[in-house]
Amino acid sequence: MATGNSVAAPDRTLVTTRVFDAPRELVYRAWTDATQLAKWFPPEGFSSPRCEVDARPGGVIRVDMKAPDGPPFDGKVFPGPGVFREVVPNERLVFTMEPEVAPGQSMPMVLMTVRFEDHAGNKTKLTIEQTLPTVADFEAMAKQGMAQGIRESLDKLAGVLSGNSTDRGVTVSGRTLTLMRVFNAPRELVWTAYTDPKHITKWMFANDWESPVAKQDLRVGGRFSVTMRPADGSEEGFVFDGTYREVVTQERLVLDTSDGRVMTTTFEDVLGGTRLTLSLGMALDEAQERLGYTQILDHFAAHLATLSDRK
């Protein structure tokens, strides 16, 4: 959350910013195309059985949100009607949203202001202001998880923009690359697929590579190694290895790699699946590291899906 002088009511406004690896026109389209909006606007685990967008002043915006089956919401649908107030294509959207929690019972109206700005390298900076009618309304919505809700929605937007349903965004801070994914699988299964050598050889490689051998001693001080090589045998390849600094079963792994970097992986339950976050120091340039680990996690997702299908 951040606030600035341009915010009209900072004491009752949540401001969220995010940079996406997509041009402004594509990000704007994801907000104004109902098919795309339905895929990402509902928070993690929720879907949208009804989504309408008439992007003009006075036009309707509606995103009904359906909870997953089972507790705590048991598949309940929460209507989300709203109205556009301002529309400046590829620059600015202003609309209201007044979610209904029960027939005839609505939450406080939220005024959403969305700004789209070009960012370095054909990226887009998105700034979202969510303003409530009163400070009391804002405090109540904050306690109900408003910040988490918009964060999860924007994580899903990253996947819509990349065309990968498991993708929840890639960020770089200094020399640290962080990739986040959400998998439609229980945390126990995600952990097993990530740590068992017989599974690791099925996914831990970039496109056109393979990993014929993986060794694992899953404990603090234990060693990990995987042999990676081109699938066509044109090169010998190399061994990626390290020593575990932290091991918390089904929650957290910290690996000190033999080339002096740190790789941290966390596992969290979310509605409908498991969030995996991978952070590591970069040995190569950002583009190479980003591409390589994106492909590795794509392969992990594909392998995990085969395991989920068997259950």
Image (cartoon, rainbow, N blue to C red):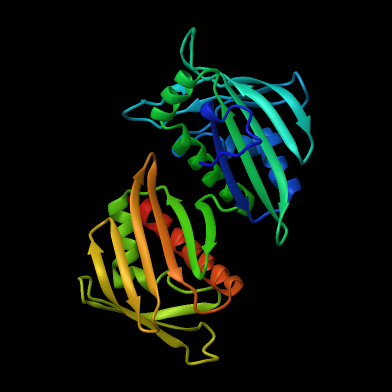
Determine the residue located farthest toward the front in the rendered image: 5
Is any part of residue 214 visible from this angle? no
Q: Residue at x 47, y 88 (%)?
A: 237
Residue 145: image location, x then y, percent: 42, 32
Position of 273 with respect to 146 (left or right) is: left
Pick the residue in front: 311 or 53: 53
Q: Residue at x 61, y 52 (%)?
A: 19
- Examine the rendered structure and indicate whether residue 5 appears above or below residue 81: below
Q: Residue at x 72, y 47 (%)?
A: 117
Residue 32: image location, x then y, percent: 71, 35
Residue 126: image location, x then y, percent: 64, 44
Position of 189 with respect to 131 (left or right) is: left
Residue 252: image location, x then y, percent: 29, 60
Q: Residue at x 55, y 27 (%)?
A: 49
- Examine the rendered structure and indicate whether residue 311 appears above or below residue 264: above
Pick the residue in front: 167 or 285: 285
- Examine the rendered structure and indicate whether residue 64 appears above or below residue 272: above
Quarter of the figure with residue 93: top right
- Examine the rendered structure and indicate whether residue 166 appears above or below residue 213: above
